[in-house]
Structure formats: structure tokens, C-alpha cells
Amino acid sequence: MLHPSRLGRLTLLPRALSAMAAPPAGASGQAGPCFAVEGPGSDLVCFTLSAGASGRPEPRCFVPAPGRCYSLCVPAASSVPMARLHRRLQQRLRQGPFGRCRVLGLLCYGAQAALEKGFLIQDPQGGPETERALEELLRGLGELPPLLGVYEAGERGELWQCLWALRGAGGRELLRRARVVAAEEPPLHPAVPGLSHAAVFHSLEAARSVVEQCTSFIPEATAVLDLVDKCPKQSKKGEFPVIVIEGLDATGKTTVTQSVNDSLNALLLRSPPACISQWRKTFDDEPTLIRRAFYALGNYIVASEIAKASTESPVVVDRYWHSTAAYAIATEISGKVQNLPPAHHEVYQWPEDLLKPDLVLLLTVSPEERIRRLQGRGLEKTEEETELEANSLFPQKVEESYKRMENPRCQEVDASPSREEVLRTVLYLIKKHCGSL
Ligand SMILES: *[C@@H]1O[C@H](CO)[C@@H](O)[C@H](O)[C@H]1NC(C)=O
């Protein structure tokens, strides 16, 4: 449960730093805020604001009259309270009075301000109920809630964004009214620059500080930190080889890992490690920032287990940093595969302070074969797995991210043939890279 007074205090942001509240592009040529609407699995629809008349067309993400649209944004920085506020809004917008609305992801960027994440709420019926419910939702968040964008059609069919600040005693103040005009999709997905701060952790300290901020509302966070702090820092690999097996669900990872483990007389480890996996459910229910920090810390705990075990026998690891990073990138970057950060981007680099394996094998099967294998299972699914199945772009983005990982990169193995054949290939690759065992 988020405490309203805490949120109220923390939403006290200088408005000048808010991209949403930045002035629209003017005649002087300064850049105004830009918005990207994230349709389900489709392209980004971008728009910007214009102070005066403009010959540019209206963007395609607004419902025609009598429908109405609204928007809300919160800063997307690596702040735990903001991440929770975003998550809370997301949950509330799925319920009650918003049932008839379509809620799409919205990114607000540009205007020399940090990225903001929010929602475009499309109400196909119009009417005052949705606006009233949004106001009520925002007022429930504290003394300085996020601003409310209300979109309305002008006399000649043009579109306007009215930006409202809610005030005490039921009052509200119009901060500005600006024309909404279509904009080009930016060359880089707007969420890419923020990935390294909010979703992909490149040091123990970065992940640790996020989980540390959660101890007051997630009791398990303290236990996770205790386990992390007990691990020796800067753990070094022993003389035995360390082999990581990566891949999407239903690529045969578990079978292959177990067979390789048996064949090499190895020790089998997995990330997240057994000592924290009982808290997965808790962290899976938290916003991306917190969930990713938890999985990142899991990798550092596994690293210390690898360091110890690899002095005694070969080690096989079922998922490690590459999975944590690939799933984070694919979740944060909406839309098509082309939206991913370009190859060699910093998000694909291995963290300097994390023990490196000798070999990383990426198991791949065709999408059709993977669906067939998934259907043969009856497991309880996490939100992420459900998304994975519902949206075929998601697994494509995860797999493409795996393939872009560097230093160490993933060695791809076609896992569609028989178990025996896949195992033979895998053992051959291990022998080739790690020498005699
Ligand atoms: C991994 O292999 C070792 C050696 O064959 C075996 O003792 C161990 O039980 C295996 N681990 C798992 C989880 O299968």
C-alpha cells in the first residue's frame, strides 16, 4: 500500500523540470515536449504541442467525438517512489470507472527534461464521469498530484491539450492550452536513454541502493540485502569452467542444463538463486525498477556461489545476467524489434563488477515450435510470461537482445532437433571453448 502523505511530499517536483509542463514549441524555435503513445504491440504514435496555428495534421491516437482523451505522467527516473506511483496509477486505471476506457502507455520526452512515463486514457463515450474519476484518483495521491491533460476538439476540428494542476478544496488551475499536432517518430525509442538508470543495472551498488529504498514497505528486501552483504566482494572464478545456458521459456533450457550438468559431473546453479527465489512472487508484483534490482542482486549472489563451486568442479548455470538484462530491455522498449537500443549500446555490456562465465549458450527454437512447447505446459504464469505469450513481439525482442549482448556474447544453439542431438552440439561447443574437462 502506498502511503498518500509520502507520495504527496515526493510529488513536490519543481515544475520547470517537468517535460509535461514545458512550454510548447514556439515561434522562437525552441523545442517543446514530445509525446509517444505506446499502442499494444504496434508503432509509436508521436505528437507534439504547438503554441500557434499549424498546418500539421492531428495524430491518430485520439478518439473521435463524443469520445474524450486524458493523459497523466510521472517522472521515469530511477526513483522508487515514482516507480511505485506509476504502478499504482496503472493498477487503478484498470478498475472501476475506467473499465470502458482504453489505457495506453505514454512517454513524454524532449524539452531538455527527463523522461516521463504515463498513460493516455481514451474514453470512447465521453461524458463527465471519467474526468471526475481521474480527478478523484489524482487528489487521492497527496497535495501535489501529477498534472492532468485533457484533450478537446476545437471549432475547426483541431485538437487541443489543456494541462490542469489540481488545487486544494476541489479547485484546479489551467496551466496552458496548446495545439496538438502529429510528430515524426524519433530515431531512438524515447525509453532507450533511461534504460541504464531504471531497468538494467550495471553494478552491485546501483541495484543494492534501489532494494535498500524498499525495506520500509517490502520486509523481504532486508533479508535479500543481508544475503548480498554476506557474499564476498569481487569474487573470482575458480579453475573449472563455468557454462551459462540462456534462452526463452520452452526452448528446452531445463532439460539441456540438467543433461549438461550430468555429463560434466558439474554443479548446477540458477539465477535467481534458491536462497532468494521464495521472494520472487513478492518482487514480481513490484514495479520494473524494483523487480529488476531484485533479479540483479540475485546474479551477484549466484556469482559468489559460482566462485566457490568452480574451484571444485565445472559449473552449469541456468540463466544469469543476460536473462536479467534481455527481459528488462524487452519489457521497457515498447513496439517493434527495431525499437531496441542499437547493437553495441551500453545496455548490452556485461557489468564490470560481476563474475564472467567462460561460455554462454543461447538456446533458440522457431516461434511456432516454442508456442507448441508452451501449450504442452500447465504452469501458473507470471504477468511477464502472460505478456510473452500474448504479444509475439515480446519474445522476439528478448531473443534479439540476447543476441546483442557483448563481452561475453551468447553462442547460439538451435534447440529444435532431438534432445540427444542438442546435447551433442552443446557438449561439442563446451569442449571447443573450455578444452578438456
Ligand atoms: C548435477 O550433477 C551432479 C553430478 O553428476 C549431481 O550430483 C547433481 O545432483 C546434479 N544436479 C542437479 C540439480 O541435477
Image: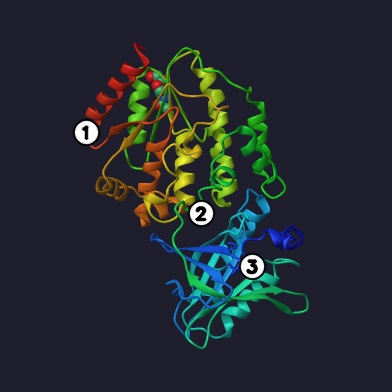
Mark 1 / mark 3, whichever is N-terminal: 3
Identity of the amino acid at label 1? Ser
**Amino acid type indicated by mark 3:** Pro
Q: Amino acid at mark 2?
A: Pro
Label 1: how many Cα within 10 Å (few below 14, some 14–19, many 20+): few
Q: In the drawing, does residue 370 fall left or right of residue 59?
A: left
Secondary structure of the residue carrying tag 1 is: loop
Determine which quarter of the picture holds residue 319: top left
- Which residue does the numbered mark 1 point to in the structure image? 418
Q: Does 302 appear above or below 55?
A: above
Say which quarter of the image contains residue 303. Answer: top right
Query: Taking the image as drawn, is residue 279 in sight?
Result: no
Ligand 1 image position (quadrant): top left
Q: Nearer the viewer, residue 156 or 26?
A: 26
Are the residues at dot 2 and dot 1 in contact (C-beta closer than 8 Å)?
A: no
- x, y (%) of residue 381? 43, 51
Labels 1 and 3 touching (C-beta < 8 A): no
Element type at marker 3?
loop
Camera-side residue: 45 or 200?
45
Pointers 2 and 3 in contact (C-beta within 8 Å): no
Between discs 2 and 1, the one toward the N terminus: 2
Q: CA distance from mark 1 to mark 3?
A: 61 Å
Q: Nearer the viewer, mark 2 or mark 1?
A: 2
Name the residue rendered at 39%, 47% in the picture: 397
Q: Is 165 rendered above or below residue 427?
A: below
**Is residue 46 shown left or right of residue 251?**
right
Q: CA distance from mark 2 to mark 1?
A: 42 Å
**Mark 1 against mark 3, which lies toward the viewer?**
3
The residue carrying mark 3 is 23
Kindly identify which residue carries mark 2.
190
Q: Who's the residue at 37% across and 23% down the image?
A: 261
Inter-mark Cα distance, 2 to 3: 19 Å
